[in-house]
Image (cartoon, grey):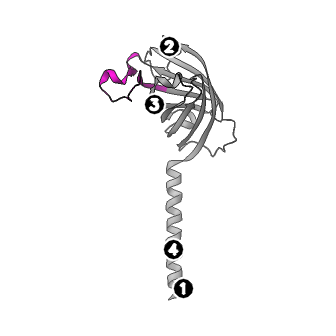
Amino acid sequence: MRIGALCSGLFVVLLLALASAAVGDQTGRCQEVRGHAVLKATQFPCLTENVVDDTVFDGCYISMVKGNLKGPWISFVQDDWGFDLATVGAPVPDGSPATWYNREFEVFETKHGVVYGDAQFAFDFRIFDSDGGGAIPTIITGGSGIYEDAMGWIVATFKDGSIETFHIRGRICGPNIPGYSDDDDD
């Protein structure tokens, strides 16, 4: 009886291991994202071509990323993608001169492919008066090259009242991403 129970237990462990392996194969591998970025240019109107389709964007912010997602980072914006939350009837903190909502289409160009993302965030303009900080979260929506069918997130954080330098953290997973370590150069 003990051998039967042992065999049954080993069989269950084997099934769980195979199920875990199958889930890993379906989601692919993940790449940790870490580094920093510096804003290099702003363009209004945007002179940079959108790599996804022929959409004409009102403006864009071009940053250079260093770390393991190295390359240009372009944030595309439309005129109606940003507004003061108070003007649309949304609640804003008491005493806030302006709480702003913004949306951007993010493109990270790397030597292994392009990462696409959608960033939506709100912030209080007082952070620029108080040397405060903030965060811009991006949801990864796909890409090209090894980032085709990728998903994940990237958060750019800034501090000291400057939106010209960012720290980058995140995680991108997909079926085409090889097993990069945190120390890889992209």
Q: Which mark is residue 3?
A: 1
The residue at the point 53 percent across, 22 percent down is 128
Q: CA distance from mark 1 to mark 4?
A: 12 Å
How many badges with numbers are in the image? Answer: 4
The secondary structure type at the circle numbered 2 is loop
For badge 1, the amino acid type reads: Ile
For badge 2, the amino acid type reads: Cys
Q: Which mark is residue 184?
A: none
The residue at the point 50 percent across, 65 percent down is 16
Task: Tell me if 31 is positioned left or right of 50 in this view.
Answer: right
Q: Nearer the viewer, mark 3 or mark 1?
A: 3
Of the image marks 4 and 3, the number of the one nearer the N terminus: 4
Task: Tell me if 110 is positioned left or right of 142 in this view.
Answer: right
The answer to which of 2 and 130 lies nearer the viewer is 130
Magenta segment range? 79-105
Q: Nearer the viewer, mark 4 or mark 2?
A: 2
Q: CA distance from mark 4 to mark 2?
A: 60 Å
- Residue position marked by numbered label 4 in the rendering: 11
Residue 163 sits in which quadrant? top right
